Image (cartoon, helix red, strand yellow):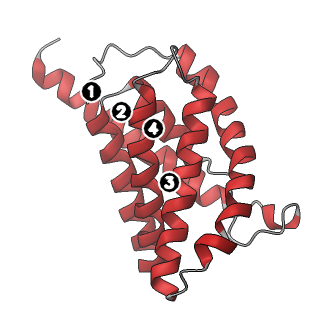
């Protein structure tokens, strides 16, 4: 396969993954998780299944493109606050997951990498909320319950991603 064909294939896969992440992000808004866990704004993080797949099976630049594009489109649909939360959480999660993936199968499992991403996502979003609302105490009051729920949602996301990650071994060399 020549370079042009590989680039088209890679761009097409990235576009499909952005679309899937968007659908998952929008679909999870319909899941009333707050009824089970009384933590405002809690979500399953279904779109992070796509990010986890991209981190483990594609290049870091593809994962970055997917996270940023998904965040920009969600921001265009839902407004600038969603954009800020999505970018802050998504990029911090991506950075930590890219660090954790270096030890994949030696140190971290798929679930471990997912947990790292979930925790980082929560930290990024609460940090932005603290800045936007000018309430630094949010980090002390809201972050702990969010991190606890992130253990559950990060585990579920990792479990959901595991069969997909194991099944699909793409002929793309993983590189930063």
Q: Are marks 1 and 3 in contact (CB under 8 Å)?
A: no
> Which residue lies at the image location 71% right of the left edge and 45% below the top edge?
151
Residue lying farthest to the bottom in this orientation: 134
Q: Secondary structure at mark 1?
A: helix
Question: Where does the C terminus fall, quadrant-wise?
Answer: top left
Relative to 98, is 23 above or below? Answer: below
The residue to which callout 4 is attached is 97
> Which residue lies at the image location 35% right of the left edge and 27% below the top edge?
58
Residue lying farthest to the left in this orientation: 3
Q: Is residue 32 visible?
A: no
The residue to which callout 1 is attached is 9
For the residues labelled 2 and 3, the Cα–Cα distance comes to 14 Å
- Please tell me which of labels 1 and 4 falls first in the chain: 1
Q: Residues within 10 Å of mark 2 (few under 14, many from 20)?
A: some
Q: Are marks 2 and 1 in contact (CB under 8 Å)?
A: yes
The residue to which callout 3 is attached is 22
User: In the displayed structure, does residue 161 sit left or right of residue 11?
Assistant: right
For the residues labelled 3 and 4, the Cα–Cα distance comes to 20 Å
Question: Where does the N terminus fall, quadrant-wise?
Answer: top left
In the foreground, 66 or 55: 55
Which of the 4 image quarters holds residue 160?
top right
Instruction: Measuring from the top left, give residue 33's x and y in whole percent.
Output: 79, 61
For the residues labelled 1 and 3, the Cα–Cα distance comes to 20 Å
Relative to 58, is 140 above or below? Answer: below
The residue to which callout 2 is attached is 13
């Amino acid at each position: 396969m020549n370079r042009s064909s590989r680039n088209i294939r890679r761009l097409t896969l990235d576009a499909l993954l952005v679309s899937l992440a968007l659908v998952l992000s929008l679909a999870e808004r319909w899941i009333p998780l707050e009824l089970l866990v009384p933590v405002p704004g809690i979500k399953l993080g279904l779109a992070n299944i796509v990010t986890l797949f991209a981190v483990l099976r594609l290049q870091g630049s593809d994962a970055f493109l997917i996270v940023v594009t998904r965040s920009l489109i969600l921001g265009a649909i839902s407004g600038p606050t969603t954009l800020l939360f999505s970018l802050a959480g998504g990029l911090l999660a991506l950075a930590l997951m890219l660090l954790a993936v270096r030890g994949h199968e030696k140190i971290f499992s798929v679930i471990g990498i997912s947990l790292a991403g979930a925790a980082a996502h929560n930290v990024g979003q609460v940090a932005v909320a603290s800045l936007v609302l000018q309430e630094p105490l949010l980090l002390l009051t809201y972050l702990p319950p969010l991190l606890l729920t992130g253990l559950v949602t990060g585990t579920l996301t990792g479990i959901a991603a595991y069969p997909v990650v194991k099944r699909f071994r793409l002929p793309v060399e993983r590189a930063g």
